[in-house]
């Protein structure tokens, strides 16, 4: 495992170093060259984990947060941010949290720079379509944003709301209970749906990506086996209001699933779950604790393989 970490870390460093060689000029007549400069890890630090921690802690030491021209050079700043986020997988959560908050504190020297980096983090860590999406890291960002004196209270309303949603139904915590309704009008609750594992599938009948997830789950021999052996149940929930559209879609859903809708529309209106995008998958254990939150089909299948 240590060799793997060292290899991956070395690759990251090489990639970052290549990025550090990029230079850009500013407006016409200004010959100042700009580049992202990587810090050097002291040679006395030899352990891969400690080297990764040092890099993450000192990653932004040579970055000039007062130079707002860098905002318009994404090939420098955005690439550096992407590399920085990628390094986070090699360090403990405590290191990642303190590094992000310290970095955002440095960025607060200029409001434009602070807003720019806040937007980059949202793009990479929060956007449903980002392959680097990471709710835990984004929580650290949001906490830093809410603590920043550079923003007024109005500017903090949305980040505060996003943080409130992100802190709901976190991995390892009990999922929030809710009531669902079946096609025959019968009702059930999350906590009365007994299963070793319960896959929550929030979907929309007219959603193409939802159809893809449905097809992937149906075609998976592993998922089929788990359902057949009563180790897994799938609770599909339609959280919106168009009941006619849901009824017209019933025949498409597998008979082995629990196909339901939220008659009170509380999932949507009360934001019981963070459904920033549809489809959304949660995997719960027998005690209804969240095992996987807002993940892809591949992540669910990989977990079951283990």
Image (spheres, rainbow, N blue to C red):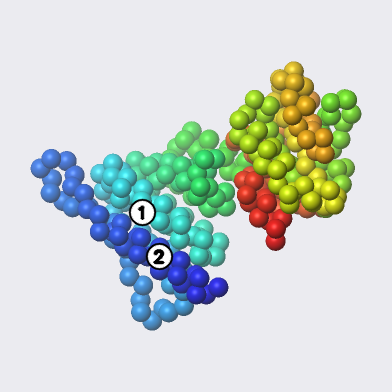
Q: Left or right of 76: which side holds 203?
A: right
Which one is in front in this view, the residue at disc 2 or the one at disc 1?
A: 2
Q: Name the one closer to the observer, 30 or 3.
A: 3
In the rendered image, which quarter is residue 193 located in?
top right
Q: Which residue is mark 2?
A: 11
Q: Residues within 10 Å of mark 1 (few under 14, many from 20)?
A: many
The picture places residue 143, in percent across and down from the top left corner, at 53, 49
Percent x, y of residue 196: 83, 53
The quarter holding residue 113 reads top left
Question: Residue at left 12%, top 49%?
Answer: 31
Looking at the image, which residue is at 50% across and 44% down?
Answer: 130
Query: Which element carries disc 2, helix, strand or loop?
Result: helix
- Look at the image and tell me whether residue 118 can be seen: no
Please, is residue 19 above or below residue 201 in the view? Answer: below
Residue at 67%, 50% (x, y): give it: 300
Question: In the figure, 57 relative to 119: above or below?
Answer: below
Residue 158 in the image: x percent, y percent? 53, 35
What label does residue 67 carry, if any?
none
Q: Residue at x 37, y 65 (%)?
A: 13
Name the image quarter holding the C terminus: bottom right
Label 2 to label 1, Cα distance in Å?
15 Å
Mark identifier at residue 80: 1
Q: Secondary structure at mark 1?
A: helix
């Amino acid at each position: 495992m240590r060799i793997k970490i060292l290899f991956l870390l070395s690759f990251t460093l090489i990639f970052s170093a290549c990025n550090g060689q990029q230079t850009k000029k500013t407006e016409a007549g200004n010959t100042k060259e700009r580049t992202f400069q990587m810090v050097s890890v002291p040679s006395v630090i030899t352990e891969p984990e400690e080297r990764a921690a040092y890099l993450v802690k000192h990653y932004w030491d040579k970055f000039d947060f007062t130079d707002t021209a860098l905002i318009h050079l994404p090939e420098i700043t955005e690439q550096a941010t992407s590399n920085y986020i990628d390094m986070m997988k090699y360090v403990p959560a405590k290191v990642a949290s303190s590094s992000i908050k310290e970095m955002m504190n440095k960025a607060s020297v200029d409001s434009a720079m602070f807003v720019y980096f806040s937007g980059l983090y949202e793009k990479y860590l929060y956007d449903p379509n980002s392959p680097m999406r990471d709710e835990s890291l984004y929580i650290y960002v949001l906490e830093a944003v809410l603590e920043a004196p550079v923003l007024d209270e109005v500017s903090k309303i949305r980040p505060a709301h996003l943080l409130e949603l992100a802190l709901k139904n976190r991995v390892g915590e009990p999922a929030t209970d809710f009531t669902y309704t079946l096609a025959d009008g019968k009702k059930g609750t999350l906590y009365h749906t007994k299963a070793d594992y319960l896959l929550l599938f929030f979907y929309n009948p007219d959603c193409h990506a939802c159809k893809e997830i449905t097809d992937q789950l149906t075609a998976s021999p592993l998922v089929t086996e788990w359902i057949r052996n009563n180790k897994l149940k799938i609770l599909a929930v339609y959280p919106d209001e168009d009941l006619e559209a849901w009824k017209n879609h019933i025949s498409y859903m597998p008979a082995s699933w629990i196909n339901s809708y939220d008659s009170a529309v509380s999932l949507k209106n009360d934001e019981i779950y963070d459904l920033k995008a549809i489809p959304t998958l949660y995997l719960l254990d027998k005690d209804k604790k969240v095992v996987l939150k807002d993940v892809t089909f591949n992540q669910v299948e990989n977990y079951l393989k283990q």
